[in-house]
Image: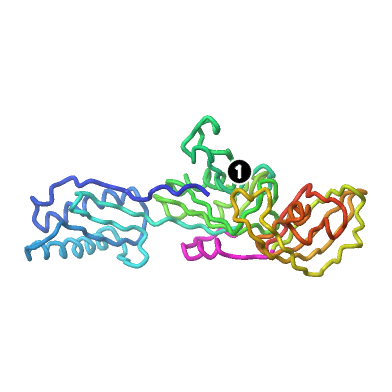
Amino acid sequence: MAKKERSLLIYPFSFEYEELNDESLIHNLFLQIKEICAEYVFNSLSIGVSWPPLEEEELLELKKSVQYSLTAKLESDLGKKLDFTASEAYFLIDFNKNAIFLTIKPVYIYGNYCKLSRELAQTTHFCRKCGGKGCSLCNNSGLTTQESVEQLLAQVMVPLFDAKQLVFHGAGREDVDVLMLGEGRAFVAELVEPKKREVDLEKLAEKINSEFKDRISVNSLKYSNKVELVEVKNSLHDKIYSAIVTCEDVPELEKLKLNKKFAVIQKTPVRVSKRRVLKDREKEVTLLEAKPLTENEFELKLQTTHGTYVKEFISGDEERTVPSLVSLLGVKCTCKQLDVLEIL
């Protein structure tokens, strides 16, 4: 996932407020905010005011006047709706720092993606040596991936929304060499500091699908929110996989009990042990179909619970997964190819 950049816009005052009365102060603030509003499309706003410590009653009244009179003028003259609970733009008028601070609410787009390339990561991977700053190891790019689902979506969506960046939030992930097929995996694209808030989502999907037809496709796009983003990231789903399994000896596929769910204990796999805590994970696996392809190779269709390491279930991972396909068949097995067929 891309590192989310700071989302706070700062506009210094173009006037000295101490020299103005309340009417001219509101007028000057209105003109400056109106100029800022010309850069961004939004329907609702809220305003806060931060002042130096005030003692005189006249200054206290001025504070109230600025906040309420300015809000009313923005509503009437610019057609913006006041919304303190879910505003699309928040203006903080800070008389301590003589500046207007603007926070623009992100645009959230929910959808499903399919990954059609075995050389495509889901999210941007930053160089572990430099943390994204750029070094000799990553050719000063800061990245170890030149393309990902996140980066491809950003190429289309960031310009259309005139946003600062896109941050990708997926409902889980698959390995780089694993395809995501069927209806795809749920995701939410967070567009940071968008200057536009609405585009035709059907045309957006068509553009993505045509430009990257051999790499990704998207469907079911809709406008979303932060609540749904959290739900997507925390969602747990069973998955159906298709694996091409290669065996050291001829496998006796009749040993496999199909359509019977059984428990599997997986110790943290060797390949992720440097970045995952060492523990046992209990998962469930159902073998759905085993179809011979050659004497030593077959296609396995299986259903697993969330977070199952399928490649390790097939190989046994040095007996760190019990039972495994190796222990069920009694022959050494490796996963030659893996696809996610469906997320349930």
Q: Nearer the viewer, residue 304 or 42?
A: 304
Magenta region includes residue 226 = yes
Q: Amino acid at mark 1?
A: Glu
Say which residue appears at 77% left-offset and 68% top-offset: 262
Say which residue appears at 87% left-offset and 63% top-offset: 256
Using the rendered image of the protein, determine whether residue 8 is visible from the camera's viewpoint: yes
Q: Position of residue 240 (x, y in %)?
A: 73, 61
Magenta region includes residue 311 = no
Q: Nearer the viewer, residue 338 or 312?
A: 312
User: Circle 1 sits on which residue?
Assistant: 211
Where is residue 47, by image quadrant? bottom left
Q: Is residue 45 left or right of residue 121?
A: left
Using the rendered image of the protein, determine whether residue 242 is visible from the camera's viewpoint: no
Q: Is residue 175 left or right of residue 259?
A: left
Q: Position of residue 162 (x, y in %)?
A: 43, 46
Magenta stretch in the rendered image = 219-238
Where is residue 90, by image quadrant? bottom left
Q: Position of residue 58 (x, y in %)?
A: 7, 63
Q: Is residue 184 left or right of residue 24?
A: right
Q: Position of residue 320 (x, y in %)?
A: 73, 56
Say which residue appears at 48% left-offset and 65% top-offset: 227
143 to 113, vertically: above or below: above
Q: Secondary structure at mark 1?
A: helix
Counting the numbered discs, the total is 1
Q: Quadrant of the C terminus?
A: bottom right
By what rule are the colours in the image chosen?
Answer: rainbow
Q: Residues within 10 Å of mark 1 (few under 14, many from 20)?
A: few
88 to 15, vertically: above or below: below
